[in-house]
Image (cartoon, rainbow, N blue to C red):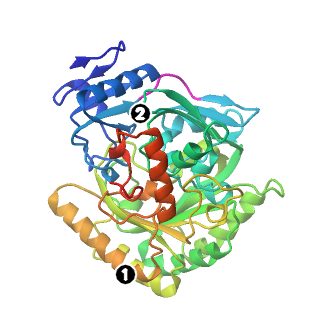
Amino acid sequence: MTVVDEPGTLIASPGDPAYEAATHVFNLAGPLRPVAATTARTVDQVRAAIRHARAAGLGVRAHSTGHGAPAGRPMDGDLLIRTRMDGEVEIDAARRVARVPAGTAWAAVVTAAAAHGLAAPHGSAPTVGVVGYLLRGGLSFYGRKHGLAANSVLAIELVTADGEARRVDAASDPELFWALRGGGGGFGVVTAVEVGLFPAARVVTGAAYWPAAHAPRLLSAWRRWALDAPWEAGTSLRVMNLPPLPEIPPALSSGPVLCVDGVVLDAESGPGTAERHAADLLGPLRAIAEPVLDTWETTTTAAVLDAHMEPDEPIAIAGDHLLLREIGDDGAARLLDLIADPAGSPLVTAGLRQLGGAYATPPAPGGALDRLDAAYAYSGAGVVMDAGSLAAIRDRCARVREALAPWDTGRTAPTFVEDSEQPQGHLSAEQIGELDRIRQRVDPDGLFRGDVTPNASSLI
């Protein structure tokens, strides 16, 4: 353990409890093993850690919750800074803005915003860190109405390689502000963000589950609805192979089930439209077969965090992801053959997230990643128990990728990427060249180069 010049800044080595705390990740399939690690709670501690790294000849890496840990590069020769910044979520209700310290998870933001009748463009899991999710794009259930979550970022506070604490927005440094929003990282250690909120006191949200035997008809009906669905609706359809655990209802663990979950907002035309849009979706599905469990209801925005039934404790997950064009009946059949296999699948969950709407046509240009031109985001993942289960998951993922190849756009959404070795592509060659130039300006020595995602630089 080393104490550096800022009080409370402890640089820990492997074997120290402080090292284990700083390197803790939510996705246990991506353990972090840097040379040294520290947990920073103040801007001065971040600056001190950067100075220490320079003096020791180490690169600098940053993370908060570690949900996306397997997608990062190895940390050989690096100092890891875990950001757990002091302070609470601050809501400016008049401006509809939240200031969020790095290390904060979405549950805190959703709760704070809901007290003012506002909502944030959050992810489906309450435990996900706000900063990483936002700056990697962010696919919210609200995204078909409000676009990628990165488009809602209004300002970013960070410490750059020169040790300076900066507040970056569209006026102060427009090109760095552009790069930070979806540019693949490697610009500094983010300590806080300001994100725009939107009015939403109540929504229709929930999940409905059917035995997977009904999957072909349900998927067909859902796809027909999704083709011209209102932008206020954002949903996903997944086949789930859930284990028989005490916290899982027996109806969901007795065999594969198909789940349709999501959120519907009221339209600008007035209250009550959310219920009508939800009925247009759910009525035909419920007519095909009665769900074994159905939680869709009109409720508060806080309930959106429960709709996707994400795990709330660390777990080892491996999987794959594609952005797809409209798959048609042929693609739907190929997909179901592999994820709704009656013989069983190693993928605990696999399916499609509805895109379109403001995802593809944002109201104004945003950062380096401000839109996704695809019909669906496919993702599939399994729980890694041992080498055998990992091999089975990877084999099934490869088979799904091969089956969906005719509809693969070749692009990906960064927050859905589960593995640094899987194909990634959310930036054009022109954007990558511009990002390299901006990194050279703010980090000429490449102190943060290890934090750059695999597809975001031509120089690594």
Going by the picture, which residue comes out furthest to the right? 269
Q: Is residue 340 left or right of residue 384?
A: right
**Image-quadrant location for residue 412:** bottom left
Amino acid of disc 2: Ala
Q: Is residue 35 above or below residue 42?
A: below
Q: Which residue is mark 2?
A: 161
Q: Is residue 149 in view?
A: yes
Foreground of the two, 171 or 287: 171
Report the number of discs: 2
In terms of secondary structure, what is the magenta stretch mainly? loop
Residue 243, given in percent of the width and then of the height, sits at 31, 58
Q: Is residue 303 left or right of residue 34?
A: right
Residue at image x 43%, y 45%?
Answer: 440
Q: Residues within 10 Å of mark 1 (few under 14, many from 20)?
A: some
Foreground of the two, 363 or 130: 363
Residue 303, given in percent of the width and then of the height, sits at 58, 45
Q: Residues within 10 Å of mark 2 (few under 14, many from 20)?
A: many
Q: Is residue 384 above or below residue 187?
A: below
**Image-quadrant location for residue 266:** bottom right
Q: Is residue 107 above or below residue 284?
A: above
Residue 362, given in percent of the width and then of the height, sits at 67, 59
- For the N terminus, the quadrant is top left
Q: Which residue is mark 1?
A: 403
Magenta stretch, residue numbers: 84-89
Amino acid of disc 1: Ala
Going by the picture, which residue comes out furthest to the top? 7
Residue 292, given in percent of the width and then of the height, sits at 49, 64
